[in-house]
Amino acid sequence: MTKKKTLICPLTKFTKILGGKWKIPILFVLSKGETHYGKLHFLIPKISKKVLSENLQLLQEHKFIKRKLNVEDNKVYYKLTKRGESIIPILKDINIWIKNTYPNENFEPSISTEK
């Protein structure tokens, strides 16, 4: 007897993987270049360290980011993979669409613009 494969809508898959409050802001920060854990936490000030770690782990599992330990400074660095880089233009388009569709909304930035 063969098991019947469950069908899933591609957009449902997208929201299942990248849904939640923090994964997309993490990807946007990493789109600027390789960043160490402490700077990620600084640039996304409202995220707790526990939630940041959990979201980084999930993004690694889905191959959107890579993690590497730099032995010289003993810091953990993260960067986008090719998959992660490929999603950024789509996320930027969604961001523009939301702002154009809801022009009277006062959107709060999820990430710090400080360096």
Image (cartoon, rainbow, N blue to C red):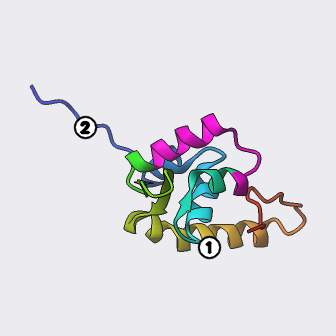
Report the residue at 77% width, 69% height from top.
Answer: 99
Give the main secondary structure, helix, strand or loop, of the magenta stretch: helix
- Can you tell which mark lies on residue 105? none
Give the extent of the magenta segment.
42-59
Q: Residue 66 lies in what quarter of the image?
A: bottom left
Reply yes or no: does residue 43 show up in magenta.
yes
Report the residue at 56% width, 62% height from top.
Answer: 35
The front one of 45 and 59 is 45
Q: Quadrant of the N terminus?
A: top left
Three-letter code, disc 2: Lys
The secondary element bearing badge 2 is classed as loop
Residue 3 lies, with reference to residue 78, above or below; the image says above
Image spot of residue 88 (x, y percent): 54, 69
Mark toward the viewer: 2 or 1: 1
Judge from the rendering whether residue 21 lies leftward or rightward of residue 86; answer left or right: right
Residue 114 lies, with reference to residue 38, above or below; the image says below
Three-letter code, disc 1: Asp
Mark 1 sits on what residue? 93
Mark 2 sits on what residue? 5
Which of the marked residues, 2 or 1, is nearer the chain's N terminus?
2
Image spot of residue 64 (x, y percent): 43, 57
